[in-house]
Amino acid sequence: MKQTIPMETSRLNCRIKFLQYVENLNLFESELDDAEAIRRQRFATRIYLCMLSLLMISLIIYAAILPRTIIVKIYRLSEYQSIELDSHHSDTLKCPCTHVAQQYGEIVHANVIFHEVCQSQFISQQYINIIYGANVSFISPIDIRTTLSAFWQLVRSFCDLAKNTLIDAYTNFNATILLSTTVQSKFLIETKVETSLNFSLSSALNNLKRNLLITHETILGNGFMSGLATNYYMYLPVTLQYLSTPIIGVNSFADGCSCSNSNGCRRPAVIFETNGTSNWTNVMGMMFDCLPSDAVLASSLECFYDKSCLSLVQNHIPMNMRLQPLKTTCKGKYVWRIADDELPLHHLIPIQIN
């Protein structure tokens, strides 16, 4: 007991000295020696030490919970492992490629689905020859029987143009090179592929559209006469039959529209019940214009999806070949409609890329 009492007294003295040290600690001493100034300096010291302690504690906690990056090397990484690692460690995952450059054609397959009319019998040469053989010498130009053969010939030409254009675009797309030094996610690759494919298609179709517009303006500028006499026609006046050179006339209509107008005379195509012009029936979706190509681009295929409308057309054209209506599960999508001042082929021949 004689040894314990001095030890406890020593501990008590240490505590008292420590408390006095803390109480008198002043980190902001100045030349002022009045009691109020010293009290404020000591109070500021205590606040400073408390804030410093809180900061240190916060840093220690942050360092304790901060995730640590561990470098792990995996050889012969499988596709499943790549997907799993990318989903959990997309920010830190790095996987160098053995092949930096690769063509799209080696990793992508695009399935081009054309308009069903491009595989139908309506554009077959046999059907075109049959409807061309109909006697239309005394039928009005706006009667569909006058232009139906040319209509399907033009549709077939547009189908061929679309196919050749898209084949060229797809060839260019396949030759495009994907560059990457590291493995990329499936989503990123699909995004790049879709962007590149859309660019190739858009460029090809825009070039074709420009060529069609140039052809269209050339025909109008030179005043070419349609072989169907839909814009101009030649005739010999009864009173001047001795003339060796026929006179060229311009088709005009009751509303004052003339085919000498560069905008044409677009109007619904009809079927006259007789060789006269008194009784007629509108053909659903079909349009007449001074140039057959303009008429095709302004028309739709609605009539050829409809059984009754198709029967109306076929009943007025003597033929031994009866075709069935076009069939599709999305008729609204595959009926072309374009603006008056445009000739975009991608509206004429819809496609689907898988």
Image (spheres, rainbow, N blue to C red):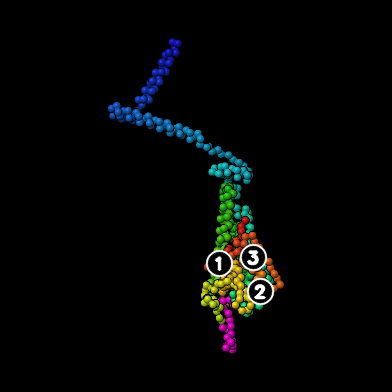
Which residue is nearer to you in this view: 275 or 110? 275
Q: Residue at x 62, y 53 (%)?
A: 107
Image coordinates of residue 182 in percent, x first then y, are: 57, 47
Tell me the CA gap for discs 3 and 1. 23 Å
Q: Does residue 146 appear in the picture of this structure?
A: no
Q: Which amino acid does label 2 sit on?
A: His
Is residue 346 within the magenta segment? Answer: no
In this picture, which residue range is highlighted in magenta? 229-247
Pick the quarter of the image with the C terminus.
bottom right
User: In the rendering, which numbered label is found on residue 305?
Assistant: 3
> On screen, 33 above or below 5?
below
Q: Which one is in front in this view, the residue at disc 2 or the one at disc 1?
A: 2
Q: Which one is in front in this view, the residue at disc 3 or the one at disc 1?
A: 3
Image coordinates of residue 166 in percent, x first then y, are: 61, 62
Q: Are marks 3 and 1 in contact (CB under 8 Å)?
A: no
Residue 238 picture quarter: bottom right
Image coordinates of residue 129 in percent, x first then y, are: 67, 73
Tell me the CA gap for discs 2 and 1. 31 Å
State the residue position of label 1. 343
Give the mark, 3 or 2, whose residue is nearer the N terminus.
Answer: 3
Q: What element carries label 3?
A: loop
Pick the quarter of the image with the N terminus.
top left
Give the mark, 3 or 1, whose residue is nearer the N terminus.
Answer: 3
Which residue is nearer to you in this view: 279 or 91? 279
Q: Please rate how many residues cluster around mark 3, counting C-alpha atoms within 10 Å: few if below 14, some from 14 to 19, many from 20.
A: some
State the residue position of label 2. 316
Q: Residue at x 59, y 43 (%)?
A: 85
